């Protein structure tokens, strides 16, 4: 099998759709030898900030000398980004072998009960982390938590970043319903750490933690004072994510001791592409990449641009997926720029660029709003602009990283982020 054939096999699994539930994942993991039983996890759920919090936890524990696995989704360019050990992507030859080893196990399933792509990838990751003898795995949920395939593990700690309105068509149309899905990762007696600020959502998390006798820690700011010079990620919101990561480390001090200087070292070196990521091109042009794919993310981006880049009014290049609340995102971002370029995202789920443009124009009549054929066209038009913000879908941010030459290859792998699903069973 070649690497291209392994990727094609994963594409083939998309025909099985996305079906929520833990039975198939448990069964496949058992056939693979239950690798999760050989590992320790920190399980992270939430609406925004999951990936950044995971990256911080990974960096802190690696700074403490641990061998750390990192499982996240979606990927920006290469599928291998989803499965990393000490921030090294799973090697192509290892991924090929993992695919070859899991293929015979899938014959145990009937066509109408076949594991989904995400379930297969979840077990692939568990096998790899066990083989690599990881001391700890930072384990991000895919969607929700309660019936997400990642929920077959019992972690050292469960982390819920926050609760906001996103994926309502699958998780529920209220903060309380979404909170119940995210809080589904809480296990009996396992500590929970959250930065959830919304009172109605926190009440749900608190109730589930009480029912499961899981000690609950709620944080609002960081006990460890962190200066901007000690922190590599942009945006005030990342300070709260850092507070959450530090609080989690403190909760687990007895199991995994970490010194303060190691925490600071980890936060100083953390790297998480595509989230307020600033790139400077040789001609001096600044490009800010940010996957502001829901309303809360758009508000964070608007605040960051207004504070950090207030001297540099940007040009915005925007594309979104149709299943997101893109009208609200457009209205939030419109006041930032006098030039806005809308594009289609390289996805079957893309929102129409003309509809995006109409919404921006309505929200900011004084702005020049242009619809472009694609991202490359928009980048070419704006190659001489001093400051460009590429935002909206993470799919678009991944494409930008590739087209700007900061993450070569992988165009054929971005489509592995595609999925569709029915609402979660209640």
Image (cartoon, rainbow, N blue to C red):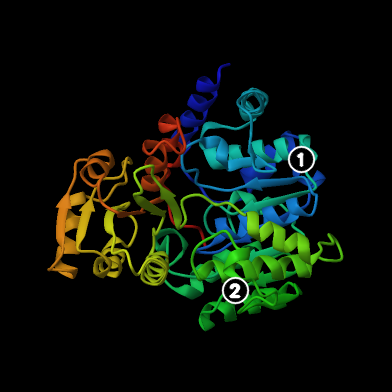
Q: Position of residue 341 (x, y in %)?
A: 21, 52
Relative to 90, residue 370 above or below: below
Q: Is residue 267 left or right of residue 380?
A: right
Q: Position of residue 424 (x, y in %)?
A: 49, 57
Q: CA distance from mark 1 to mark 2?
A: 30 Å
Q: Quadrant of residue 366?
A: bottom left
Quarter of the image for the N terminus: give it: top right
Residue picked out by circle 2: 195
Q: Nearer the viewer, mark 1 or mark 2?
A: 2
Residue picked out by circle 1: 35
Which residue is located at x 41 percent, y 48 percent? 280
For the residue pair 126 and 89, the one nearer the viewer reads as 89
Q: Residue furthest top?
A: 1
Relative to 86, residue 423 above or below: below
Relative to 39, residue 219 above or below: below
Q: Quadrant of residue 345?
A: top left
For residue 116, say whether it is visible. Answer: no
């Amino acid at each position: 099998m070649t690497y291209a054939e392994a990727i094609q096999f994963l594409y083939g699994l998309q025909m099985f759709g996305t079906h929520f539930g833990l039975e198939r994942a448990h069964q496949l993991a058992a056939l693979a030898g239950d690798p999760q039983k050989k590992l320790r996890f920190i399980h992270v759920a939430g609406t925004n900030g999951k990936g950044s919090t995971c990256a911080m936890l990974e960096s802190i524990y690696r700074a403490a000398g641990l061998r750390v696995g990192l499982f996240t989704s979606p990927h920006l360019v290469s599928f291998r980004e989803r499965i990393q050990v000490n921030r090294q992507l799973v090697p192509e030859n290892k991924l090929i072998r993992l695919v070859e080893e899991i293929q015979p196990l899938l014959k145990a399933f009937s066509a109408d009960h076949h594991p989904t792509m995400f379930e297969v990838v979840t077990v692939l990751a568990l096998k790899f982390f066990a083989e690599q003898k990881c001391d700890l795995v930072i384990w991000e949920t895919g969607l929700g938590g309660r019936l997400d395939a990642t929920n077959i593990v019992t972690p050292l700690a469960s982390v819920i970043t926050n609760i906001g309105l996103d994926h309502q068509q699958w998780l529920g149309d209220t903060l309380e319903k979404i909170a119940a899905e995210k809080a589904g990762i809480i296990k009996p007696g396992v500590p929970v750490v959250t930065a959830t600020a919304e009172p109605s959502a926190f009440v749900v998390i608190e109730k589930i933690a009480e029912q499961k006798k899981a000690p609950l820690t709620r944080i609002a700011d960081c006990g460890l004072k962190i200066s901007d010079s000690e922190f590599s990620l942009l945006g005030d919101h990342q300070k709260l994510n850092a507070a959450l990561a530090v609080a989690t480390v403190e909760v687990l001090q007895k199991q995994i001791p970490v010194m303060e200087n190691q925490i600071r070292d980890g936060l100083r070196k953390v790297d998480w592409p595509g989230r307020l990521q600033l790139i400077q091109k040789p001609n001096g042009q600044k490009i800010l990449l940010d996957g502001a794919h829901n309303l809360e993310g758009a508000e964070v981006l608007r605040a960051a641009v207004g504070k950090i880049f207030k001297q540099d009014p940007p040009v915005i290049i925007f594309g979104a997926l149709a299943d997101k609340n893109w009208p609200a995102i457009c209205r939030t971002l419109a006041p930032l720029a006098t030039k806005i370029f809308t594009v289609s995202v390289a996805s079957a789920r893309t929102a129409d660029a003309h509809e995006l443009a109409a919404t921006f124009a309505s929200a900011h009549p004084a702005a020049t709003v242009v619809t472009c054929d694609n991202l490359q066209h928009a980048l070419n038009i704006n190659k001489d602009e001093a400051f460009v913000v590429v935002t909206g879908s993470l799919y678009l941010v991944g494409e930008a990283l590739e087209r700007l030459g900061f993450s070569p290859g992988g165009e054929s792998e971005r489509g592995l982020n595609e999925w569709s699903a029915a609402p979660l069973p209640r």
